[in-house]
């Protein structure tokens, strides 16, 4: 009888017997990780520099506005106008955060690991999109809340605090509109490349290269073309929706350039909805294709 040639060792592997948390927990984990990634949390100090520099700038601006308004005794900028004033910083924040959320996973090849679990293919991009929307809303909404607290503490009576709150709420809704539109466009562009530098450059290019189109249309002899010019670029599209829905909170000079939307305010809103819906549909189609590889 031959001697055994091998030995089976028990090295302690055990079957998982804990709770299986399911799809909702996976989606929530992806979402929370995405929000942290957008601000560089849980990553190297280098990854935190730019997002927190932007956060510091917007908070510093908000604190300065609050201090000046308190000294003058009047509001120098509305909450909605604050979002418009920070639009360039939002563009650059998206250009850095969106590639961190999706381009890194494409380049490192970890998507097959995500999709090997019982995770619907749509959940991954939707969780990332919701995370970027949340990050952008916090970026614009937190400074507005700081401005509100400063105004509330210096207000004369609860009536003034209530009036301030009524000004804050449209500003937060407007910040949410900025967040949804910019996150949808930025994440879609970033999803097409695993190179973060290319993704960032593409995002900035799309936002900046559409701005001259608005300028050209706004100086054409056609008054209709002037009124519709803002639809050609995401930032001016968002501003057009804001002007249509909360004109008095955004416009201090009724005769200023680019203010006259004519009868096309609802068209701006429809264009914004179509832009977001189109970007989300293309994003889902993109990841359906990635998952099929």
Image (spheres, helix red, strand yellow):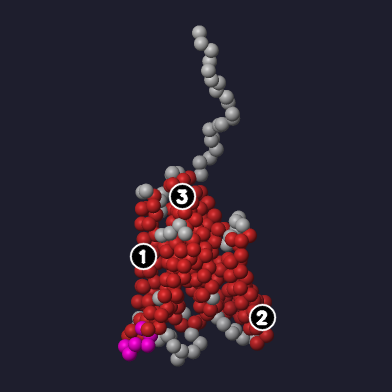
Number of the front mark, 1 or 2: 1
Residue under the point 55% across and 31% down: 14
Instruction: Classify mark 2: helix, strand or loop.
Output: helix
Q: Quadrant of residue 229?
A: bottom left
Q: CA distance from mark 1 to mark 2?
A: 42 Å
Residue under the point 36% across and 83% down: 217
Residue under the point 51% across and 87% down: 252
Indicate whether 191 appears above or below 175.
above
Q: Which residue is mark 3?
A: 109
Mark 1–mark 3 CB contact (< 8 Å): no
Total numbered labels placed on residues in the image? 3
**First-in-chain label (1 vs 3):** 3
Instruction: Classify mark 3: helix, strand or loop.
Output: loop
Q: For residue 115, which numbered disc appears in the image?
A: none
Mark 2–mark 3 CB contact (< 8 Å): no
- Tell me which segment is drawn in magenta: 217-222
Who is closer to the viewer here, 179 or 57? 57
Return the residue found at the far bottom.
Answer: 255
Q: Which residue is mark 2?
A: 67
Residue under the point 56% across and 67% down: 138
Q: CA distance from mark 2 to mark 3?
A: 49 Å
Say whether residue 21 is visible. Answer: yes
Who is closer to the viewer here, 214 or 223? 214
Q: Is residue 218 magenta?
A: yes
Q: Is residue 121 magenta?
A: no
Who is closer to the viewer here, 105 or 284? 105
Q: Which residue is mark 1?
A: 278
- Where is residue 16 shown, x and y percent of the image? 53, 35
Magenta highlight: main SS: loop
């Amino acid at each position: 009888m031959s001697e055994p040639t091998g030995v089976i060792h028990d090295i302690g592997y055990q079957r998982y017997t804990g709770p299986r948390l399911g799809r909702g927990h996976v989606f929530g984990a992806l979402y929370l990780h995405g929000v942290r990634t957008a601000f560089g949390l849980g990553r190297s100090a280098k990854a935190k520099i730019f997002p927190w520099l932007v956060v510091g700038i917007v908070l510093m601006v908000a604190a300065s506005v609050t201090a000046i308004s308190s000294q003058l005794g009047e509001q120098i900028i509305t909450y909605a106008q604050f979002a418009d004033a920070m639009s360039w910083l939002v563009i650059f924040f998206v250009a850095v955060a969106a590639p961190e959320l999706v381009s890194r996973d494409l380049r490192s090849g970890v998507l097959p690991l995500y999709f090997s679990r019982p995770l619907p293919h749509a959940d991954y991009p939707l969780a990332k999109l919701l995370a970027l929307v949340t990050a952008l809303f916090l970026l614009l909404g937190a400074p507005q809340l700081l401005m509100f607290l400063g105004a509330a503490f210096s207000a004369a009576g609860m009536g003034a605090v209530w009036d301030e709150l009524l000004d804050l709420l449209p500003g937060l809704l407007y910040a949410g509109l900025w967040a949804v539109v910019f996150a949808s466009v930025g994440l879609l562009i970033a999803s097409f490349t695993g190179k973060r530098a290319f993704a960032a450059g593409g995002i900035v290019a799309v936002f900046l290269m559409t701005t001259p189109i608005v300028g050209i249309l706004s100086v054409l002899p056609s008054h209709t073309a002037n009124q519709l010019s803002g639809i050609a670029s995401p930032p001016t599209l968002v501003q057009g929706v804001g002007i249509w829905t909360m004109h008095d909170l955004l416009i201090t000079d009724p005769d200023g350039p680019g203010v006259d939307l004519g009868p096309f305010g609802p068209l701006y809103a429809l264009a914004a909805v179509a832009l977001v819906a189109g970007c989300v549909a293309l994003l889902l189609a993109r990841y359906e294709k990635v998952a099929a590889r």
